[in-house]
Amino acid sequence: GGVGFTQYATAAYTDDILDDFLYYGMEYVDGKYGICGTEATTEVVHDIAAEVTMYGLEQYEYPALLEDHFGGSQRAAVVSAAAGCSVAFATGNSNAGINGWYLSQILHKETHSRLGFYGYDLQDQCGASNSLSI
């Protein structure tokens, strides 16, 4: 990777934004399901991933936060990481967490019509169709 990948990858470490989204997800999960307190169902994945994704996207409406993650691909990665981790917190299931990640990508794209300009759209979404394949 060159400068582009460095810019993309370091976004998760900028200004504790991912931390904030993860804390929100953890509190939501703990209050509604308990940590590792529920089964990994489609409904649970959808509920948690949608809640955390919408929280993250709403936070990006603040201009200072939006400037920190200036590329949509950066925002998509950070929001999806928080959504996926939050699903895994609730279920104790990493596969469910991956599905939360990909659902977050789809919700983000549905909300903003695209993920960003770094060219990572394909790799950020490609696992949705096969994350539970054998």
Image (cartoon, grey):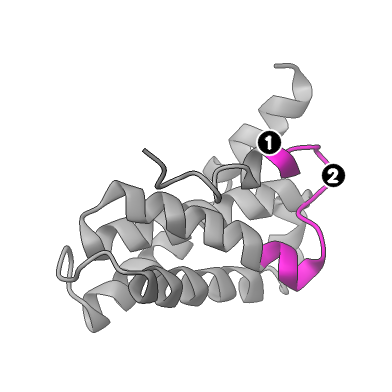
Labels 1, 2: front one: 2
Label 1 Cα neighbours within 10 Å, binned few <14 / some 14-19 / many ≥20: some
Residue 8 numbered mark, or none:
1
Query: In the image shown, does 103 or 4 lie closer to the viewer?
Result: 103
Q: Eyeballing the image, is 113 above or below 123?
A: below
Q: Quadrant of residue 96?
A: bottom left
Q: Position of residue 6 (x, y in %)?
A: 68, 26
Q: Earlier in the sequence, mark 1 or mark 2?
A: 1
At a point 60% along the width and 48% down the height, the residue shown is 77
Query: In the image shown, does 45 or 32 lie closer to the viewer?
Result: 45
Q: Quadrant of residue 58?
A: bottom right
Q: Position of residue 21 (x, y in %)?
A: 47, 63
Range shown magenta: 108-122
**Within the magenta stretch, is there residue 113?**
yes
At a point 40% along the width and 60% down the height, the residue shown is 22
**Within the magenta stretch, is there residue 117?**
yes
Is disc 1 in contact with disc 2, using a CB cutoff of under 8 Å? no
At a point 77% along the width and 22% down the height, the residue shown is 3
Q: Secondary structure at mark 2?
A: loop
Provide the residue designation for mark 2: 117
At a point 23% along the width and 62% down the height, the residue shown is 91
